[in-house]
């Protein structure tokens, strides 16, 4: 079975000239993230690049000089702290899975109880801010 953007333990062991048991031990020890599907372990191509250090080279090649940095503050009215945390967690997930071409970026969030709102502060490239604002828009549509 071929899974798009994933490599098998055998494929990785062959590329790295390591025994498959070594790769499985690395997965078990948390040195490389794997996903078990049926009886087989699969490692994403991105995780393979990270493990081998090639991700850094790829990111350096992809990252263009940034000419524009953007910052923005978004206030979202919420019913309670649980809704605030749900929004913050979802935005953190979006940020943690962003494309490396968006470069360096940051996000902070703050629950302001007296005003029943969450304040999201973003800094990064225009493209990153656009993705985050689109995500906020989708999350807050009722």
Image (cartoon, rainbow, N blue to C red):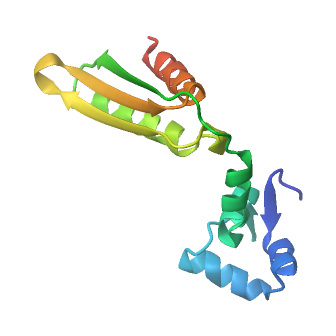
Q: Is residue 139 above or below residue 35?
A: above
Is 106 on the left-hand or right-hand side of 6? Answer: left
Is 9 on the left-hand or right-hand side of 136? Answer: right
Q: Is residue 36 something one can see in this rendering?
A: no
**Displayed quadrant of residue 76:** top left
Percent of width and height locating residue 86? 36, 33
Instruction: Pick the residue in front: 84 or 130.
Output: 130
Is 66 on the left-hand or right-hand side of 78? Answer: right
Marks counted in the figure total 0
Q: Is residue 22 above or below residue 10?
A: below
Residue ID at (15%, 17%): 115
- In the displayed image of the protein, which residue is found farthest to the top? 142
Instruction: Pick the residue in front: 98 or 13.
Output: 98
Quadrant in the picture for the N terminus: bottom right
Instruction: Pick the residue in front: 120 or 142.
Output: 120
Residue ID at (71%, 71%): 52
- In the displayed image of the protein, which residue is found farthest to the left? 114
Residue ID at (33%, 37%): 108
Q: Is residue 140 above or below residue 24?
A: above
Percent of width and height locating residue 48? 72, 65
Percent of width and height locating residue 126? 56, 25
**Displayed quadrant of residue 74:** top left
Residue ID at (59%, 78%): 28
Q: Is residue 64 something one can see in this rendering?
A: yes
Percent of width and height locating residue 113? 14, 25
Quadrant in the picture for the C terminus: top left
Instruction: Pick the residue in front: 55 or 19.
Output: 55
**Displayed quadrant of residue 92:** top left
């Amino acid at each position: 079975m071929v899974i798009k953007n994933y490599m098998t333990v055998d494929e990785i062991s062959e590329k790295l000239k390591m025994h498959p048991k070594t790769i499985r031990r690395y997965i078990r020890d948390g040195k490389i993230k794997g996903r078990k599907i049926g009886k087989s372990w699969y490692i994403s191509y991105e995780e393979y690049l990270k493990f081998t250090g090639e991700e850094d080279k790829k990111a350096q090649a992809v990252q263009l000089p940034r000419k524009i940095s953007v910052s923005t503050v978004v206030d979202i009215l919420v019913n309670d702290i649980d809704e605030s945390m749900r929004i913050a967690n979802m935005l953190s997930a979006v940020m943690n899975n962003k494309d490396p071409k968006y470069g360096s970026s940051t996000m902070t969030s703050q629950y302001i109880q007296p005003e029943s709102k969450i304040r999201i502060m973003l800094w990064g490239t225009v493209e990153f801010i656009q993705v985050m604002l689109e995500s906020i828009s989708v999350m807050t549509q009722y």
